[in-house]
Structures are given as C-alpha cells and as structure tokens.
Image (cartoon, rainbow, N blue to C red):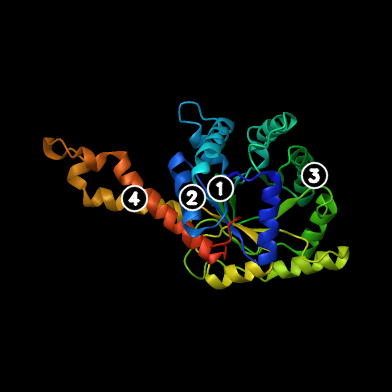
Amino acid sequence: MPIATPEVYNEMLDRAKAGKFAYPAINVTSSQTLHAALRGFAEAESDGIIQISTGGAEFLGGQHNKDMVTGAVALAEFAHIVAAKYDITVALHTDHCPKDKLDGYVRPLLDISAERVARGLNPLFQSHMWDGSAETLADNLAIGQELLAKAVAAKIILEVEITPTGGEEDGVTHEINDELYTTVDDAIRTAEALGLGEKGRYLLAASFGNVHGVYKPGNVVLRPELLKDLQAGVAEKYGKASPFDFVFHGGSGSTAEEIATALENGVVKMNLDTDTQYAFTRPVVDHMFSNYAGVLKVDGEVGTKSKYDPRTWGKAAEAGMAARVAEACANLRSTGTKLK
C-alpha cells in the first residue's frame, strides 16, 4: 500500500531512528502540492510524510464553506487513490492543532479513523498533532493523555509539542526568546504523563530554538545538541536508551550541520512548509513575468491561452516544489531508503 498501514508507519519510524535519518514532512494545500510532494519523494526514492495544517485543511475545504474536517478528509481520500501511482510509501499526518481547534479538527478526525478501524479498515490518517505549546505544561500533558488514548484506539500515532516553537503558523504565534528551549525536567514530565511507549507511541516536538518561517542568519539560534541532553536525562531516570522519537519543527532554512546534529540525536521527522511554498510559487512568478502580455489581455488584446492556462504554469510549480522535496530527502539522509 502506498499509504502506510499502522504497522508500516511504525516500521518507517523505527528504520529512521536506527539509521539516523528523518522523513521530510511536507505541508500540502491542494491536489497539486500533494502531487509535488509525492513526485519529490519518488524521484529521491524516499518514503515520506504528507501533512495538512488547520489552515491548509480549511483552504482545502473551499472558500464557500470553510471546513477543516471536510478539507482534510477530501485530500486524504484523494491521496489514497493517487499515491498508488508512486513507487514509495507515505504517511498522512495533520499538523499543528491548538486547543481551540481540537473539537473542529483532530477529535473528529480521530473519530473517523476509529470508526474505520471498527469496520476492519485502516485509519484515514496515520498520525495527528496536538499543539499544546500555548498551554501550561500540566494542561498540555493532560489533554495529551486523553488524545493519546483515542489515537491508540484508532491505530494512530500522536505528535505532541510540549514547549513553544517561535514565529507564526496558522495563527499560533510565539515570540523568539529564551523560552524556545525544552528542559530535561519538561522531558521527564512528558515521560511521566505519556509513558515511553507502553501507553501508545507518540512523536515529540521538543524545542531547541526552532522558529517557523525563514529568518536571516543570526536571528535564530538553534541548539539541536540539546536533544541529546533530553534523551540522556530521561534515559537515566527510566533506563531506556534514546527514549524519544523527535520532530524538528521550523526546518526551513536550517543548515546542514544543524540538521545532521538533530538526526544524530533522534529526530525522525522534519517539517518543511516555508521552503516548499516558495519553491512552488517561484516558477509561477517567473512564468507570469516572462509571459506578461500572454497572461493578461493587454491594451485590448486577447492574450495567449496557452500562457494563462493553469496547467502550463502549474506544471512548472509542481516541478519546482518536487525538486525542493527531493533536496530535503538528501539533507535528511532519506534518499534511497524507501521500503522495498
């Protein structure tokens, strides 16, 4: 199955952890960006993760009646069909979901997958993210416990963000300051609340200076070596080596050295959105500027249909984004690691 089963998704994550590589997790907002992500993975011979944020799901739901669940379900169903044409395996994931959107996004999606599993089918998504970074850690973990139990029942892996990632994504904003670093105590409290696998598998988005978006050098101080301290601190208390499967948020614009350090310390998933957005849009801009008279009916002329046909510039956009996805696979060492 091109869309990972729960068992295969677990295998993917285990292979990444053991091999010290990570899967690019690519945000998509349309059928075309979905194809771009799938194409990039296929060209790199890498498996991967495709994810949909709350804003992306709302956009996918259509502007007439903006509904996140409709948008997410529609794209997931579409992905289950078209992914069959690509010789790779992908997992479907939902990105950042804060507390005020749980009832309109993650909880209904968990219910949909639970109902599918009850009928002997696989879940619609393979993982969902709970972003409680705006809450107190106690409240964050209490909600995490509830969602983890529901995720386990639906054969889904939960991703949790326990401390803030800087910048802004889909209306969730955190300042860029010294609070963007998870402590060993934070990690221990997470293990106490969510367990280390016995209560269900989860991915941990810890903070080591991560910021959404791309910033000029010097504005963001990443400390991926901090992840080693978190692993060691929890391992010492619980006797389980390298206990966490980490997620690297704010991955766009990171250096090769920062990525390599993160991989060595247990990162199995890295989110990319800003860089792939630009890679998709840049060829479109080039086409519009290069074919100005063709895409516009200038001075009463009729324009050139082949230039303003969305398929023309859409193909260039897909190719640009696919190339950036393949580059991410190389950076994360997942190139050539697809399941056989």
User: What distance separates the C-alpha of mark 1 from that of mark 4?
Assistant: 20 Å
Q: Please name the residue that numbered disc 1 is placed on.
A: 50
The answer to whether residue 133 is visible is no
> What residue lies at 46% left-to-right and 56% top-to-bottom?
43
Circle 1 residues within 10 Å: few <14, some 14–19, many ≥20: many
Q: Compute the Cα span from label 2 to label 1.
A: 7 Å
Q: Amino acid at mark 3?
A: Gln
The residue to which callout 3 is attached is 145
Residue 110, quarter of the rendered image? top right
Image quadrant where one finds the C terminus: bottom right
Q: Quadrant of residue 302?
A: top left
Examine the rendering and report whether any part of residue 3 can be seen. Answer: yes
The front one of 94 and 89 is 89
Q: What numbered label is drawn on residue 24?
A: none
Q: Looking at the image, is mark 2 or mark 3 nearer the viewer? A: 2
Q: Amino acid at mark 4?
A: Ala
Q: Nearer the viewer, mark 1 or mark 3?
A: 1
Q: CA distance from mark 1 to mark 3?
A: 25 Å
Q: Closer to the N terminus: mark 3 or mark 4? A: 3
Tag 1 near tag 4, CB within 8 Å: no
Q: Are marks 3 and 4 in contact (CB under 8 Å)?
A: no
Residue 8 point in image, percent of width and height:
67, 49
SS class of the residue under badge 3?
helix
In x, y percent, where is residue 142?
80, 44
Q: Nearer the viewer, residue 273 or 22?
A: 22
Which mark sits nearer the N-terminus, 4 or 2?
A: 2
Label 1 vs 3, first from the N-terminus: 1
